[in-house]
Amino acid sequence: MKAENFCTYETAWCPGCGNFVILECLKTALEQLGKNPAEVLVAAGIGQAAKTPQYISANTFCGLHGRSLPAAVAAKIANENLTVIVDTGDGDSYGEGGNHFIHNIRRNVDITHFVHDNQIYGLTKGQASPTSMLGLKTAVQVDGNNNEPLNPVLLAMACGAGFVARAFTGHKEHLIEVMKQAIEYNGYALVDILQPCVSFNKINTFAWYNQRVYELDDTYDCHNKIGAMQKAMEFEEQIPIGVLYQEKKASFHQKNAVLKAGLPLLDRNTNTNYVNQLIQSYI
Amino acid sequence: MYNLLIGGAAGQGVDTTVAILEKLLKRSGYNVFTAKDFMSRVRGGHNFYLIRFGVEPIYSHSNQIDGIVALDESTVKIHREQLKENGFILCDQDIAKDTDTSFIVVHMNEMAKALGNPRVSGSIAIGAVLKLFGEPMENAGAVFASFVKQQFLDINMKALTEGYESVETRFMHLQGNAAEQMLISGSNAVALGAIAAGLRFYSAYPMSPSTAIMETIAQNADEAGIVVEQAEDEIAAINMAIGASYAGARAMTGTSGGGFSLMVEALGLSGMAEIPLVVIDVQRPGPATGLPTKTEQSDLKFVISASQGEFPRMVIALRNPSDAFYQTMRAFNMAEKYQIPVILLSDQYLGDATYTTKAFDPEKIQMSVPESDYTGHGEYLRYRYMENGISPRLIPGKTEQLVSSDSDEHDEHGRIVESAEVRTRMMEKRMKKLEILKQELQEPEFIGEKSFQTLLIGWGSVWGAMEEAVRLLNQDKNGNAYAALVFGDIYPLPTKLLREKAAEASRIIDVEQNATGQLAALIQEETGIICDDKILRYDGRQISGEEIAEQVRKEGIR
């Protein structure tokens, strides 16, 4: 399992962090799909997970905290030939960027969203995230987290996402396969990737996840939305991983009158005749 | 020159009536200027339009009225005192409540009902106005056809004729030569400028008074090859524009002050990541929700310093629709050349008012073409240190080079660094661009007598009123001559002509639509020049040329 085209850089992550696995699997998935780094855009917001673009050889966009989705979908709208991947954390995706998460599912631009979900804020040194479990004690949540954890995969389904998956950094080969399916899906694809935070999350440790996760097998029907929503609610005792829900949907490009035919947006030229007609219409 | 006020409640179709009438007047040769005063509601309330028309160029409204077309009673109540001697009030029977001789009663509603559609009463009013001003009917068919659906054309033409025959001519037709000019609002001129500049992506969240720009671009998007996306909020709108621009599509976003407040962090992203961006702020009175449908120029000091940290940016104030068209085109060039955010400042008055203006010529502005591949020596580095601070910008996916972009402080590769040395060099690289940009700033427009004593200073949409005020004051021939400087490029502030003219002036008067004199403060900060007096207005209504002249006269001649 090597991904030579996408290079290796020195990282600023803690030893044992799940981010290493996600980065390695991402490079492998891209390599196995035969992607050329120059046609790939890896975008992120801000956070520990959001440093992923810094460590991969591709086109990269490190934007603002919580704002990776709007920038990434617009880049895809501008140039449909780019393979656009957002690789960022749970705080970035579900907290600061919660509004963009909801509305970009509705847009259904053909991008892939890998959320490094460690259920904690890492870069700011260990506060509760939107997916933190009840009772989690931190320097801020001193009496334990009182806010219900958000269920991102259930929310994504409720918003109408056409590809929703969950994966775990402890199951590398499985993660690579899910990543590849997500990248190849035509439309917005979410993969919520469970990963331990070795420095700050003492509840959801590697062992905690490892005891609970199980891979969905061929008997599971990922095209049944109600069944998928029920499956998405399993988290406490057992955590299913794999593609939870998949549905063929028209992507943003297929729905948009301008984009559905013709050159990629950035290659279009100004129609000077039309501009002159428009000017004439005001005379 | 004539001045007509048309007033009614929201939902009465006044907007269409005015749009048809002003076009008819322009087609007959008049220069036309229409200012619009709306209330923030969809039904009811009081909206009015001031249509000024004449053979001479007109760039400002006037509050002295020759005629009122009152479609509701409050129009009469609120505006009758502005009526000149011999002025008329055209209205229906139920609105003419007293025996004032200025009333011209036309039974518009009754006539419309008899014709079979109460909605054609506006066309009856148009017919009556045309006759009152001695206007020919020959252009009417073509103009109506461009506003009214085919199946309603016949009934509207009948209504027009009945209205025409219902009154006698009171004013003489004046023959102007503006028939071949455009009649366009500031916001539509911005939209056309963006389309002509090769805009590919426009994202915005609806906000008065900026929404007209998004609507006009959207209505032409299919033919022009533009994606218009309504964002979930202004934060998404600007981040989308930045993402599209990074990926090589010319991108823009637009809003008013409240939305701009939400965009502020991303403005810094454009500056830091060096991604070209055009943003328009169509100002309205603040703070917070303020007066949503009124006008103000109070965002200047905000937009020139918005966002944390320091980075180069350019701010251009739009003065009139012609300026709006060409400066919007230029904004894209400046944003791309310097890889910076360029902010256009408009306001409700300029955005909604329609002006007669010479037909736009898009070829006047040569649009820049992005580099197609890396032609420099050595490895491609997105943020390479360059003499002029401008690093080679490539489009991701268009070459084999990898294009990185980073909101963190970064090295030449675009990767996070915390080194003091790199930080200093990168700050200098970015800020150097501003110094180079200053060399191509456009000086403010000089209006008035070459040799003058009193200098008026203003920016943006007050241009029209300043032009008229200077003309009126110089007609006084009281031994004092007047001139004005009206800024378009406003940040960085061009100071050459300002210093020159300020040195000649014995008195400088600042004219702005805000409470604190923001341009005057900027001028003082940049040049030390202090304005002697200020004419400031912040009631949400635009000052007119006549009002400026009157206030200058009141202050006395020094």
Image (spheres, coloured by chain):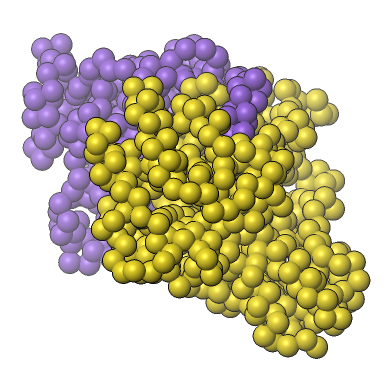
Q: Which residue is rendered at x = 41% and y = 51% of the image?
A: B207
Q: Colour of chain B?
A: yellow
Q: Which residue is rendered at x = 54% and y = 54% of the image?
A: B170
Can residue B268 be seen here? Answer: no
Q: Which residue is rendered at x = 61% and y = 36% of the image?
A: B27
Please provide percent x and percent y for residue A87: 42, 35
Residue B445 vs A184, above or below: the answer is below
Can residue A225 be seen here? Answer: yes
Residue A45 vs B65, above or below: the answer is above
The part of the image, by quadrant, that contains residue B550 is bottom right
> Which residue occupies the foreground of this view, B121 or A19?
B121
> Which residue occupies the foreground of this view, A148 or B353?
B353
Please provide percent x and percent y for residue A113: 36, 31
Q: Which residue is rendered at x = 39% and y = 26% of the image?
A: B153
Instruction: Give the tally of numbered discs.
Output: 0
Q: Is residue B316 left or right of residue B41?
A: right
Q: Quadrant of the C terminus of chain B?
A: bottom right
Residue B45 vs A151, above or below: the answer is below
Residue B507 vs B46, above or below: the answer is below
Q: Is residue B112 left or right of residue B62?
A: left
Please provide percent x and percent y for residue A163: 27, 23
Q: Quadrant of the N terminus of chain B?
A: bottom right
Q: Colour of chain A?
A: purple
Q: Is residue A185 left or right of residue B492?
A: left
Q: Is residue B518 left or right of residue A206?
A: right
The part of the image, by quadrant, that contains residue A280 is top right
Please provide percent x and percent y for residue B93: 28, 56
